[in-house]
Image: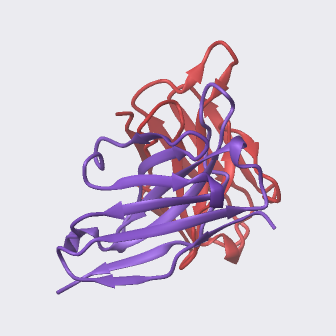
Chain colours: A purple, B red
Amino acid sequence: EVQLVQSGAEVKKPGESLKISCKGSGFRLSDYWFGWVRQMPGKGLEWMGIINLADSDTIYSPSFQGQVTISGDKSISTAYLQWNSLKASDTAMYYCARQPYYGDYVGFVDLWGRGTLVTVSS
Amino acid sequence: DIVLTQSPDSLAVSLGERATINCKSSQSLLYSSNNKNYLAWYQQQPGQPPKLLIYWASTRASGVPDRFSGSGSATDFTLTITSLRAEDVAVYYCQHYWTTPRTFGQGTKVEIK
């Protein structure tokens, strides 16, 4: 089955670190990039960045550059989103998003994970 | 960054009637070399992740009912839902994939009148 399986909900305190994951299965990794999209409570979708698991090439949105780290492990078809020091404003749903790779560009999101809810509260 | 502005922010439509959502881009999303518009539409039903509806501005994704259609070119795009059904209650987003960052519109909430 073609799917993106995300790690479970997290509750953290401000200042703590966190790494969430997204594992792809049922498709050829080299045909896709993995991305992350943030949705704050009651708000819209925000594109954070994408990674090519084949070579770890990563592109960040300027809004998120330096705030998070996107990484991956191609041997287990898994992408990660990491924070070194969480803030209350990081509270949001984070969606993993698969994007087809056409060789010279990366396309739209054709498959979404179910999301990982991150709650940061003291 | 490319800014996508959707209108309206919300609309209420009677069952069986048409819903029209607009998305205006701050720059052209039409690539002249392949005559394709780098714009997609997504549906997010309550409590669910988004789902791809339309790509290349007018191509329906697999399994999407034909009451959903996309149109437009360059900077002005439209998502039309003909004959609205109860399960179409959702927030709809446009997104470009012209360059990075791949920004989204702010979303349009569709409700039943």
Q: Is residue B12 visible?
A: no
Is B41 located above or below residue B86 in the figure?
above
Q: Nearer the viewer, residue A37 or B87?
A: A37
Q: Quadrant of the N terminus of chain B?
A: top left
Q: Nearer the viewer, residue B93 or A86?
A: A86
Q: Nearer the viewer, residue A42 or A74?
A: A74
Residue depicted at 68% across the width and 77% down the height:
B86
Q: Position of residue B101 (x, y in %)?
A: 41, 39
Residue lying farthest to the top in this orientation: B33
Residue depicted at 37% across the width and 38% down the height:
B3
Is A1 located above or below residue B24 in the figure?
below
Q: In the image, is B105 to the left or to the right of A78?
A: left
Residue depicted at 42% across the width and 61% down the height:
A81
Q: Position of residue B13 (x, y in %)?
A: 59, 67
Q: Position of residue B31 (x, y in %)?
A: 60, 19
Q: Position of residue B96 (x, y in %)?
A: 52, 39
Q: Is residue B38 visible?
A: yes
- The image quarter in which residue A52 lies: top right
Q: In the image, is A16 to the left or to the right of B43?
A: left
Q: In the image, is A111 to the left or to the right of B62?
A: left
Q: Quadrant of the C terminus of chain B?
A: bottom right
